[in-house]
Amino acid sequence: MPPRRPRPARLGLTGTLTLAAGDTDLGGAGRVALLEALARDGSINAAARRVGLSYKAAWDAIDAMNALAAEPLVERVTGGRGGGGTRLTAYGRKLVDRYTQLAQVHARFVAALDRAGMDLDSPFSLSTVLTMRTSARNHWEGVVSALRGGAVNDEVEVTLAGGTRLLAIITRTSTVALGLRVHAPVIVLVKSSAVIVATGLGDARLSAENRLDGNVARIVPGAVNGEVAVVTAQGLEVVAIASHSALRGLDLAPGKAVSVLIKPSDVVLAVVT
């Protein structure tokens, strides 16, 4: 009987954050750790021991960073009780602090990409990664299918996956700043509090230009309000927040036919740059 093959490990994603001066690498986490140790100990020798480097390797790294950076990162201090030493400059301290902040964001982003992007059996959605921490409960990917300019505001029509079309009203300044044009990819954001759920509209004509018909998928009651998820005829899930009295008044239940209304002014557009 042939030996059983070991179960393959899960594919994952990792990444490192490296500082650069022009086209030359300035250093990554290891060199920043050396600078942090130097700031703590005030001595290249002590900092080298703390991060597991020889004195020469630590000095060469610091010398290279000093030569490449826009301003010196490390300076020698003479005199004093201990006879002098080495310390970070104000610019070096700022660089270490900023790298630490960016490294935390970078680690979260790589982890998000790993969670959202490494299931090869599911399509990749960039908006899932970029908007997973936004307060907007509804976020969808789409493309600009029409753009009508006005004196102050522009009307932007976005077509989502499945063919759903939504209108957004944004300022002309925003249109220019986002670089919007027909066929440009965009991310649509709508807060759940801006979604209105209605029943029995029939052929009624409404001022809200975004009307999507569908059925209630689920209702999640809360202490003050309830969350209503509606799946439209095109398969789009839209989440709304409604008060308990409104839920009772509409007699909502899973499977019930409803309409969701979204004012174009409540549609927020975003682009990936």
Image: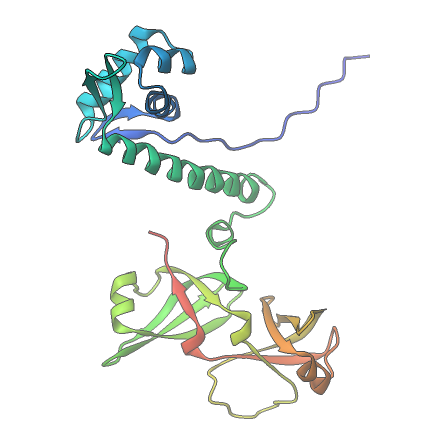
Which residue is at a point 35% across and 62% down the rendered structure image?
183
Which image quadrant for residue 230? bottom right
Q: Quadrant of the N terminus?
A: top right
Give the colour scheme shown: rainbow
Extreme residue in the bottom direction: 204
Q: Nearer the viewer, residue 216 or 222?
A: 222
Which image quadrant for residue 179? bottom left
Which residue is at a point 74% across and 73% down the rendered structure image?
254
Extreme residue in the right direction: 1
Which residue is at a point 69% across and 85% down the rendered structure image?
250
Q: Is residue 169 in view from this perspective? A: yes
Extreme residue in the front direction: 81
In this picture, is 92 found above or below 84?
A: below
Q: Position of residue 226 (x, y in %)?
A: 67, 73
Which residue is at a point 50% across and 64% down the rendered structure image?
136
In-image side of 58 versus 151 (left or right): right
Q: Position of residue 214 (x, y in %)?
A: 63, 75
Q: Nearer the viewer, residue 156 or 130?
A: 130
In-image side of 26 versus 263 (left or right): left
Q: Position of residue 170 (x, y in %)?
A: 34, 73
Q: Position of residue 52 (x, y in %)?
A: 42, 11
Q: Is residue 161 in view from this perspective? A: no
In this picture, is 144 found above or below 209?
A: above
Circle count: 0
In-image side of 260 versus 177 (left or right): right
Q: Nearer the viewer, residue 56 or 154?
A: 56
